[in-house]
Amino acid sequence: MKRIRRFLDLGNLRRFRAIVQLVSFVLLVYGAYFAIDLGSNMPVLSCGYDRQNGGMCYLLPLQHQLGRPLGMLFSMASIGILVGFVTFLLWFIVFNKAWCGFVCPLGTMQDWLTSLRKLFGIRYSSYNQTQFNRLKVIKYVLLVLLLLLPVAIGAGLIGGEWRAAFCQICPGRMITPLFVGDFSQWTIDFSSKTTMILTALGMVITGMFLAGSFVKKRFFCFFCPMSALQYSFSKFSILKLKKDGGKCTKCGDCYTVCDMQIKDIADDVQSRDILRDDCTLCMKCIAACPEEGCLQADIAGLTIFQSTKEGFSKRMQIDRPGGEDERP
């Protein structure tokens, strides 16, 4: 066991994560080609408009289920909603928000755009703390709207065109099908004023996604309602991000490598559970920490990856200077 632990602690996290992301991307985007079907309740933005997907984002069926007439919502038909939610929860509690950092196709695309930016030698953009605090609220607003709009349809307050409103504006709807040669989503639907607005807005947001993700690491994750939904149940997950504040020197290395600019990872020395709502559990903070056992990832109480001085020296190559874009 000690040999396995040491192998993990000294491992190349960047390479491991890149492999997991690539395998996950192939399974979720091209899964149908391999007769793979992981269901329609996945805790990632794996787009249902990709006809070859190997597993569908939970938000699409959730919106359709909540859009039923209110009488059906409070009948035996609601069992289907409950089953879908429980399935989503069972998927989620295994990996917590690592679904974002390792599995989500839209998250992986953003990391690829970041790699492209690095290739061109362009510096990344960042938010100041005031901007960060304001922008992080947006994902919760989108989640509330995502849940309430379908219910309003069932109550007869708005038209059925709003049933999957978030999916209409989600960049995944337009970008993911491109990987299987489907360009059909790159149109504006003029069948009604509502669909015209939503699909046009989807094009605008997709453009913002591509431009924003090129200059800002994990740009869209700040606004993702799936991230908000996940964090609402993160305490039930068996995968935890832990911190021993007594070993922290506040060097800031963890914050420097954090794609989501979470200051608590460096500044909070009181909390044992250091996972925050914007965290993608990419574990780069653990790899960047030079203090023995200060940061660690646990599954059901068993430490699977922790910060070590030897691992830091090996991964970060502290014998030579390096900026953000050189760090492995």
Image (spheres, grey):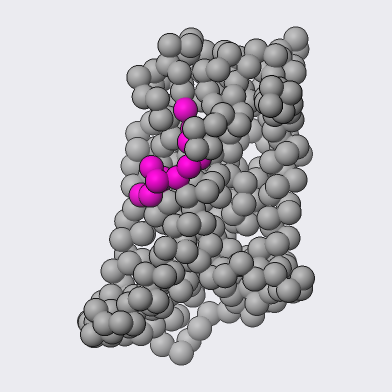
Q: Is residue 319 visible?
A: yes
Figure quadrant of residue 224: bottom left
Measured as percent of width and height from the top left, residue 152 is found at 26, 77
Measured as percent of width and height from the top left, residue 56 is found at 56, 68
Asked whether residue 232 is drawn in magenta, I would say yes
Measured as percent of width and height from the top left, residue 146 is found at 36, 66
Image height check: is 325 above or below 110? above
**Quadrant including the N terminus:** top right
Q: Which residues are magenta?
A: 231-242
Figure quadrant of residue 288: top right
**Quadrant including the C terminus:** top right
Image height check: is 287 above or below 121? above
Image height check: is 246 above or below 136? above
Q: Nearer the viewer, residue 85 or 218?
A: 85
Q: Nearer the viewer, residue 201 or 261?
A: 261
Tell which residue pokes out farthest to the bottom in this image. Answer: 191
Q: Give the total number of marks visible in the rendering.
A: 0
Q: Is residue 287 left or right of residue 220?
A: right
Which residue is depicted at the point 73% across and 60% down? Answer: 26
Which residue is depicted at the point 75% across and 12% down? Answer: 320
Image height check: is 296 above or below 167? above
Asked whether residue 6 is drawn in magenta, I would say no
